[in-house]
Amino acid sequence: MSTRGRLVISLCFWLLFFAYCAAAALNPGKDIKQYHQDTWTTDQGLPQNTVLSILESHDGYLWFGTELGLVRFDGLRFTVFDKRNTPEFKTNVITALLEDRAQALWIGTATGGLVRYREGKFTNFTVKEGLSSDSVNCLLQDASGALWIGTNGGLSRMHNGRFAVYNTRAGLPDDEVLALAEGPDRSFWIGTHSGLIQFSQNKFAVYSTSANLPDPYIRCLYADRQGVLWIGSNGGGLSELRNGKFANYSTRNGLSSNAVSSLYEDRDGNLWIGTFSSGLNRLAGKTFSAYLSKDGLSADDVRCIFQDRSGDLWIGTGGGLDRLSDGKLFTGYGIREGLASNTALPVFEDRDANLWIGTDRGLNRFRNSKFSLFTVQDGLADNFIFTVTEDREGDLWIGTRKGLNRIHHGLATTYRSPTVFQRILLM
């Protein structure tokens, strides 16, 4: 095959790949419960069900940090790296993951320092190499390429292979750094037990006060594409810092819990919020919606959230790993979406493109993406609907347990007598 032919095939492949990725993203118009869900636990190959961090690397592998090791997932198989097969891991609890611009994978651990995976080789960095603490909570690579490591002993900066340490002795108000974020304007933010801290011109300043942030115990930070800084606290709910002003959201605004554990912005600009005890939330515009274990989530304590290149959303919980995908072939409708019942019987589309769905609780019409309901109160003989059809005149005929209905210009007529049925058949 000629070079030109190979180039054309390669170009076609990548065009199809990117078209697939664009098409596969979660439809933001759907309710969370309408997405397709897959779940993985120890039964499917995870070494342990608590998933603390998620990352997709440049080569397409998904990486998961668990309490029993680092996991690489190729879509079918889980490969586990832990103390038994990887001496560079001093603990199996993996707390944070980051891939830098040079395509090296950085792995934060609970008590074993920082591990780098590059070109198939693991390297361990601890306090002996200059790390501020061996308990790593979060990782960030800034716009200059420097790696920042939040630990229980302060903040470390790694650049050109050397560590610099920032702790209370250097002016950091609190040594336990739980979250890091950098805004599009290169503003640098640090979340600690003592509030939100801004690092600028090599100086630290506590940015939050009791007046603008309900709880100073910051658990997570996220700087979105618009430059808004989102703040999740231990008990004060969700806060945003936009153009220098704070706004706060809590259960009073629709958030399922005020204990926020993780934050992530998807490609459509929706903010996903993990909580410690009340599942997953999505903030679309100013509207919160929730997805909990009763809806199918593996557990209600959400530890991490990540969207892959194909647009699927991955959620790590204390009970396993969940993936929400668009499920373009099938979209479910039930009581949660406005259908009268989850027992759907006949389905019929009339000449005006209205969709009629018979249930055991009445007849639904689906028009303009909304359901309306017709029951015995509207003249139906019974709410248990067996059949629906339309005649040449455009009248709708509905078969129920207690007789036949005809709907003509919105008015329902009931037929029960056998003699009347005979007349109908002769019409």
Image (cartoon, helix red, strand yellow):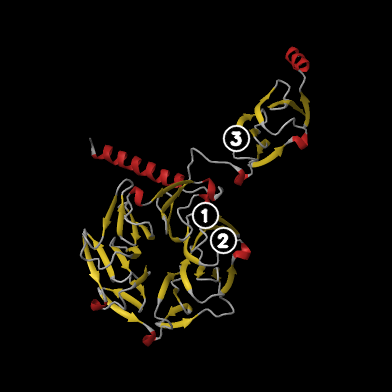
Q: Viewed as shown, does residue 94 lie left or right of 189? A: left
Q: Is residue 409 visible?
A: no
Element carrying mark 3: strand
> What amino acid is labelled 2 in the image?
Ser
- Circle 1 residues within 10 Å: few <14, some 14–19, many ≥20: some
Q: Amino acid at mark 1?
A: Leu
Mark toward the start of the polypeptide (3 vs 2): 2
Within 10 Å of the Cα at label 3, are there few (<14), some (14-19), or many (20+) other Cα atoms? some
Across and down, in percent, residue 122 comes to: 22, 63
Q: Which residue is mark 3?
A: 344
Q: Measuring from the top left, give residue 210's x and y in whole percent.
A: 57, 80
CA separation, marks 3 and 2? 30 Å
Residue that appears at 33% across and 73% down = 135
> Do the CB atoms of the residues marked 1 and 2 lie less than 8 Å apart?
yes
| Precedes in sequence: disc 1 or disc 3 | 1
Where residue 380 sits, quadrant-wise, is top right
The residue that disc 1 covers is 292
Of residues 373 and 84, the one drawn nearer to the viewer in this rendering? 84
Furthest residue in direction bottom, as rendered: 169
Position above or below: 45 against 216? above
Task: Kindly identify the amino acid type of the residue bearing the numbered disc 3.
Answer: Ala
